[in-house]
Image: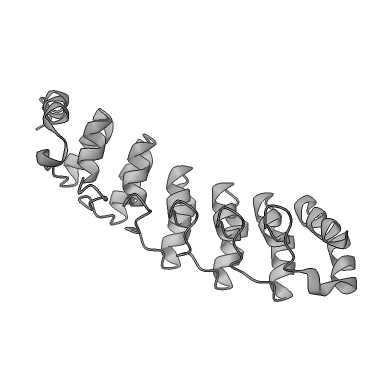
Amino acid sequence: MAWVDLHSAAARGDLDQLRRHWWLKKHLINSRNKDKQTPLHLACMNGHADVVRFLVSKNCKLNPRDKYKKSPLMMAVQYQQRECAAVLLEHGANHDHRAAAGNTALHFAALVSNKSLVELLLEHGANIDAKNELGYTPLALAITERRKGMVEFLLQKGADVNATDNHERTPMEVAAVLQDKDSVKVLLRHGGVLNKGCLGEYAARAFEELCQNEL
């Protein structure tokens, strides 16, 4: 089928072949594969910024979402393809779209602990305190993944140190439940607070033991 060639060319970064298929089948530029991915998704995943520029120049859809509701921008961020992400953002890609679990592109940047991508997204207006379906901000998500450097970086960039999740837990409480002393230290320096009522008796005692030399 024609769409297979178009998707394959984008995935390989074969710009010459893509141009040939574009002129022959230009209505397929937004076609979907079995995973509901467009050629733009595949070019972003594989880091082919020249292909991304070509597709964008031909007015492809910037924000189509695949079967997991991931946009091309999310794929570029997840696979740490900064140049592709930059091209999309420069042309107005939506950084606020939500994937299946409610994560934004900034959540994905925090998950892969890529400071350059976080900075790029923030420069284009991404919400540093956006919440996913669990109520986790990128900061809270970074804590769950034990990304100490990213936790510090997000706080330096102005993340809300006490934003609560769906269970009214602050990032400090998330760190306490995980017994993550490194994150606790960072959060304390930035004014993180604890609501012991959200932790339960056992977790509150564990937190006190964890922080006995810090508080």
Q: How many marks?
A: 0
The image position of residue 57, as x and y in percent, is 71, 74
- Residue 59, compared with residue 175, is above or below; it is below
Please give the name of the residue rendered at 70% of the width and 76% of the height, measured from the top-left corner. Answer: 59
- Residue 176 appears in which quarter of the rendering? top left
Q: Position of residue 215 (x, y in %)?
A: 9, 33
Q: In which quadrant of the rendered view does residue 151 lie? A: top left
Left or right: 185 as drawn, with respect to 15: left
Which residue is painted at 43% across and 65% down in the image? 123
- On screen, residue 15 versus residue 210, left or right, reads right
Q: Is residue 47 above or below residue 38?
A: above
Q: Residue at x 51, y 68 (%)?
A: 94
**Quick one: 199 or 77, which is closer to the camera?**
199
Placement of the N terminus among the 4 image quadrants: bottom right
Q: Nearer the viewer, residue 166 or 16?
A: 166
Rendered residue at 37%/42% (across/down)? 142
Q: Is residue 103 above or below residue 142?
A: below
213 or 64: nearer the eye?
64
Q: What's the colour scheme?
A: one colour
Give the image location of residue 149, x and y in percent. 36, 39
Residue 96 sits in quarter: bottom left
Residue 125 at x, y = what percent? 41, 68
